[in-house]
Every structure is written in structure tokens, then in C-alpha cells.
Image (spheres, rainbow, N blue to C red):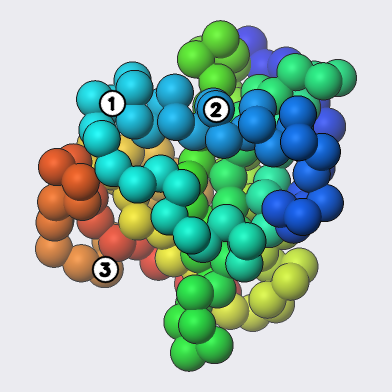
């Protein structure tokens, strides 16, 4: 597998240009709704409270994820992890998650972090030190498990 050079951009939603925000939301809809044949509310009302992490090659969006803490008593979460279909097979999923983990560690030092992982990706997330902490459940018709990475 080859890797590609990228830059990391982390910002709140209100700091995006309309064009950059459109590109990120389009990537998420293309992956989570269209590619996975899963009609669900991708625009769930939470993006305003999140930090959005993007991997870019110039203006080309390679991958994105969102980072947030739903409530003060919850662990920080990494979600909406998506790699552009045009850039798969380049280890960008791993790069994206390592950048997201690093960003969460910077903002919430010593705290555990959680993800809701599609079940077939347990081994991938396990390689990044996430452990399964729930039974499998269906989310929008797709099997998931909750996973925790200790701080």
C-alpha cells in the first residue's frame, strides 16, 4: 500500500468556506448514504458543536472525521470517519485516525475516547488501541460496536 502526502486541517464548522464545507459534507453523504445504501440523517444537527479534521492534498479533500464531546459527562468521540473513494488503498484511514487521536489527546489530555465502529472494522480500530465495550447493535441497519481507547 502506498501513502500520500497530506496536510491536516482542524476547524469548527463556522470557519469553513462554503465550498470547503460543501466538499466535506458531500464526501460524507457519498460514503455513508450513497455508497453504503443507508438513507439516514447524515446532517444530524451535531456538526456545529464539533471540530472537523480534514486531510488535504492542496485543495483535494482526501479524508475527514469529526471530533466532539456530546455532553460534559461523556468521553470525547471520533466519528464520521470517511476516506474519499478516489483515495482508498493509500493508508489514509490509518493516517486520519492517528491524526484524530492526536488531536483528541491534545484537547482532552489523559481522557479516554470513544467511537461507534462498524463491526467489520473492529480489527482496524483495535490496531489503534480501541477495545470493544458493547454488544453489537444495529445503527441505521448497519452492525456497530462501541469502542474505547483508554487515556
Check if mark 1's residue and mark 2's residue have beta carbons within 8 Å: no
Q: Residue at x 71, y 53 (%)?
A: 13
Q: Residue at x 58, y 79 (%)?
A: 111
Residue 135 drawn at (x, y percent): 13, 63
Q: Which residue is mark 3?
A: 133
Instruction: Report the front residue among 130 and 13.
Output: 13
Q: Residue at x 33, y 20 (%)?
A: 35
**Discs 3/2, front:** 2
**Label 2's element?**
helix
Q: Which residue is mark 1?
A: 36
Q: Which residue is mark 2?
A: 26
Say above or below: 17 vs 135.
above
9 with respect to 32 (left or right): right
**Label 3's element?**
loop
Residue 36 drawn at (x, y percent): 28, 26
Instruction: Report the front residue among 124 and 100.
Output: 100
Amino acid at each position: 500500500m502506498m501513502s500520500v502526502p497530506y496536510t491536516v486541517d482542524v476547524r469548527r464548522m463556522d470557519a469553513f468556506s462554503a465550498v470547503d464545507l460543501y466538499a466535506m459534507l458531500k464526501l460524507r453523504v457519498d460514503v455513508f448514504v450513497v455508497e453504503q445504501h443507508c438513507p439516514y440523517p447524515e446532517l444530524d444537527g451535531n456538526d456545529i458543536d464539533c471540530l472537523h479534521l480534514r486531510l488535504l492534498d492542496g485543495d483535494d479533500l482526501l479524508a475527514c472525521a469529526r471530533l466532539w464531546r456530546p455532553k460534559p459527562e461523556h468521553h470525547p468521540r471520533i466519528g464520521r470517519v470517511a476516506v474519499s473513494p478516489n483515495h482508498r488503498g493509500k493508508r489514509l484511514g490509518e493516517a486520519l485516525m492517528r491524526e484524530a487521536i492526536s488531536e483528541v489527546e491534545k484537547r482532552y489530555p489523559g481522557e479516554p475516547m470513544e467511537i461507534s465502529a462498524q463491526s467489520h472494522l473492529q480489527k482496524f480500530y483495535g490496531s489503534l488501541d480501541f477495545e470493544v465495550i458493547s454488544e453489537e447493535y444495529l445503527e441505521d441497519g448497519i452492525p456497530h460496536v462501541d469502542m474505547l481507547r483508554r487515556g
